[in-house]
Image (cartoon, grey):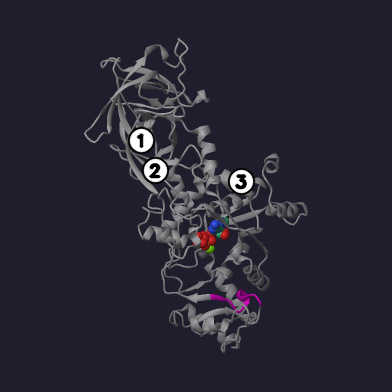
Amino acid sequence: MSEVEARPTNFIRQIIESDLAEGKYKTIQTRFPPEPNGYLHIGHAKSICLNFGIAQDYRGKCNLRFDDTNPVKEDVEYVESIKYDVQWLGFHWDGNVRYSSDYFDQLYHYAIELIEKGLAYVDELSVEEIREYRGTLTQAGKNSPYRDRSVDENLSLFNKMKNGEFEEGKACLRAKIDMASPFIVMRDPVLYRIKYASHHQTGDKWCIYPMYDFTHCISDAIENITHSLCTLEFQDNRRLYDWVLDNITISCRPHQYEFSRLNLEYAITSKRKLNLLVTEKIVDGWDDPRMPTVSGMRRRGYTPAAIRDFCQRIGVTKQENTVEMSTLEYCVREDLNQNAPRAMVVIDPVRVIIENFSANLDEVLTMPNHPNRPELGQRQVAFTRELFIDRADFREEANKNYKRLVLGKEVRLRNAYVIRADRVEKDEKGEITTIYCSYDPATLNKNPEDGRKVKGVIHWVSAKFALPAEIRLYDRLFNTPNPGSADDFLATINPQSLVIKQGFVEPSLRESKPESAYQFEREGYFCLDSKYATEDKLVFNRTVGLRDSYAE
Ligand code: ATP
Ligand code: MG
């Protein structure tokens, strides 16, 4: 239990603890209920960590249930990606994956029970008429002329709906509750509609599909869910959740609790809008490293541990708020700083020639993979006469604040020697092509003996052995912190959100694996791209910079 105590509590955990203390439940059962109509995003990760985290901490169970009641928008591609993402985040669902569609027969029988009790009726108003009759927040709705049909007539019409004897939109099943309810969801909500669409799980067995509100509570009850956790926009729907369960014969009685959605600055967390970015080819798929999807974050090099840490830090409340991107990046950096091996990579290369170093010599230097974790091992890197350093690490003239290489001055090459820049060569445009230097052989990983102070340290790669690599630098996808509220969010895309550079990486990076991050010294955290890297071409994604780039 100590692990439970170590976690920050929240109002949902408090409810669970008191339910357990009162003996209301012996074991806790939660569920994560995605609709398979898109890939999971960071908001879903919050819900996953909450539902699976509670099950873990209170020795309960959590189901993965696909809420698959709208075959038109759903696809097995999404089912597969969601299963993969949940496991990648480090969670295990109880038993088999479940589908609301597993319960279509039972749901159908519960609908009949409601009809038999006079609590549901087949309506033949059109979709527009139903909307008109519903009323508004300030005006009560009015009853459908079909509302008072007999039970027998309703049973027969519902059967006809099921048998495909109505056209789409010509009939639906509605709950008979109260057209004057202050809660619009209670104004005779639709329970079933007709859709002539093949379903990814049930094929063509059904042409009537149950609505979310009818399906969700019953699926929860069938699965013995104790605490059904969802986001705040379903607060009013709780009345309908309770109404359905109170009016059918079912033994388990789950309860719904709502928490606020995660909104993330500079990101979109609506599947519909994320889908638009994909279909409009603004990004190169759901797993584009700029996407706030679980698959995008994975491809970018974010770790499951960092995402879980983030979800824990932001907490669970009922207050709507927007979390800063820097919070997420902080968690990623914290994890990678501890765990990512170091490597040297030059993103914007300029050639350096060490004139007093033999062209025939490749001096093998041994470097630690991590500055304070010797258990991560060492690697060997060749030091040669020709090197690359970053263009930004050299100036012909500079003041004292510039702690890198300056003409006539010295700098340390990371894990190697102190060098001095003696002269430069430029092309006809005046751009430096080569920096001629000399090295001090007595300074391998130690200070000059005569007490000269060399403050700056820069990174380098051997021009002879380094491998060319494409480096993809990502920035925020949107120019505005709250793109979701823009009239046209596509107009707020940051044109600089991807910048591609051609650099050089140390040869050890040939062994790197997709999604497994390195710290490229002085540059940031990077990982091999799972989509574009091939046997012959190294492509790295910048996971996150070394410092907070969102701080204004
Ligand atoms: P979207 O608006 O992106 O379509 P959704 O809520 O319709 O999201 P579902 O697949 O129904 O997506 O979501 C599965 C679960 O994840 C639900 O319980 C939902 O409340 C939760 N969830 C979705 N988005 C967020 C979010 N931004 N923050 C927290 N939980 C979320
Ligand atoms: Mg939903």
Say which residue appears at 42% left-offset and 14% top-offset. Answer: 443
The residue range painted magenta reads 182-191
The 10 Å Cα crowd at callout 1, few under 14, some 14 to 19, many 20 or more, is: many
**Badge 1 is on which residue?**
347
Question: In the displayed image of the protein, which residue is found farthest to the top?
Answer: 450
- What separation in Å lies between label 3 and label 1 (alpha carbons)? 34 Å
Task: Kindly indicate the quadrant of the structure image that contains residue 454.
Answer: top left
Q: Position of residue 158 (x, y in %)?
A: 53, 81
Q: Nearer the viewer, residue 156 or 468?
A: 468
Q: Name the element at disc 3.
A: helix
The question of residue 254 being in magenta is answered with no
What amino acid is at disc 2? Leu
Give the residue type that dot 3 points to.
Answer: Arg
3 vs 2, front mark: 2
Q: Which residue is mark 2?
A: 473
Q: Position of residue 175 (x, y in %)?
A: 60, 78
Rounded to the nearest whole Å, what is the CA distance between mark 3 and mark 2? 27 Å
Q: Is residue 190 magenta?
A: yes
Viewer-side residue, 472 vs 513: 472
State how many labels appear. Answer: 3
The residue wearing badge 3 is 313
Q: Nearer the viewer, mark 3 or mark 1?
A: 1
* Disc 1 and disc 2 in contact, CB within 8 angstroms: yes
Q: Tell me which amino acid carries mark 1.
A: Ile
* Residue 126 seen by the camera: yes
On screen, residue 440 versus residue 162, left or right, reads left
Q: Position of residue 455 (x, y in %)?
A: 47, 22
Give me the residue at 42% from left, 45% from top.
299
Q: Determine whether 214 is above or below 35 in the image.
A: below
Q: Earlier in the sequence, mark 3 or mark 2?
A: 3
